[in-house]
């Protein structure tokens, strides 16, 4: 199934950056979304804003927010820490998930391209769209190899809490673009 999903991945560089989104006004299969983030416990303020956008996003699709504590086995070596986090994330990903890795070296996309990514994922045959936000040392080898696509939210490095907020806002924005609603201008 992984090979099937990988073969269906959209070529993000081919996505138009101009006006409109190819799915605006069309029916789009709403895959359930799982956001897996690695890091320290979110601050109350960050969680409050995140919950607001998750509630808005739930108007369009089901959303699951899964938080994994960074360095789950208290490893002293950062490589071991990444390996432990990698295993914890991989335990949550199923073979029929369409996996989006958020990485500072990923493809730089805009909001309309993100909307097209969400729309395209619904056409892959996947059962769920999983977004992965890494811990302080990034993602492990297994997840990098498993990911269907790697994107970046910004040219700047963002900590996991800010990356999570930007992601949920952009997912909400994506759905408003797909539905042709007024939020995105």
Image (cartoon, rainbow, N blue to C red):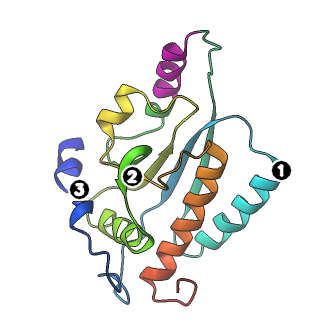
Closer to us: mark 2 or mark 3? 2
Which residue is tagged 2? 151
How many labels were placed on the picture?
3
Residue 135's place in the image compared with 80, above or below, is below
What residue is rendered at 55% in x and 10% in y? 77
Dot 3: element: loop
Q: Quadrant of residue 110?
A: bottom left
Q: Main secondary structure of the magenta part?
A: helix
Marks 3/1: CA distance?
Answer: 36 Å
What residue is rendered at 35% in x and 28% in y? 142
User: Which class describes the residues within 10 Å of circle 3: few (<14), some (14-19), or many (20+)?
Assistant: some
Dot 1: element: helix
Residue 113 drawn at (x, y percent):
36, 70
Magenta stretch encompasses residue 166? no
Residue 89 drawn at (x, y percent):
49, 33
Residue 125 drawn at (x, y percent):
26, 59
> Which comes sooner in the sequence, label 1 or label 2?
1
Query: Looking at this view, is 172 or 90 the one in front?
Result: 172
Report the side of 166 relative to 4 (left or right): right
Which residue is tagged 3? 9
Residue 130's place in the image compared with 124, above or below, is above
Which residue is tagged 1? 44
Marks 2/3: CA distance?
Answer: 13 Å
Question: Residues in magenta?
Answer: 77-88
């Amino acid at each position: 199934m992984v090979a099937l999903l990988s073969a269906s991945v959209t070529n993000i560089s081919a996505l138009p950056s101009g006006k409109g989104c190819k799915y605006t006004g069309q029916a789009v299969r709403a895959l359930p979304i799982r956001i897996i983030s690695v890091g320290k416990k979110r601050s109350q303020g960050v969680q409050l804003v995140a919950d607001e956008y998750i509630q808005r996003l739930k108007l369009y699709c089901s959303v699951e927010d899964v938080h994994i504590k960074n360095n789950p086995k208290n490893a002293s070596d950062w490589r071991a820490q990444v390996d432990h986090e990698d295993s914890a994330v991989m335990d949550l990903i199923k073979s029929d998930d369409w996996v989006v890795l958020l990485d500072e070296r990923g493809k730089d996309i805009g909001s309309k391209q993100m909307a097209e990514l969400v729309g395209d994922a619904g056409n892959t045959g996947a059962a769920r769209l999983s977004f992965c936000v890494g811990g302080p040392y990034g993602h492990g080898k297994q997840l990098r190899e498993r990911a269907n696509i790697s994107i970046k939210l910004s040219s700047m490095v963002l900590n996991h809490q800010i990356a999570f907020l930007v992601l949920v806002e952009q997912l909400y924005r994506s759905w408003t673009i797909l539905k042709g609603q007024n939020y995105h201008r």
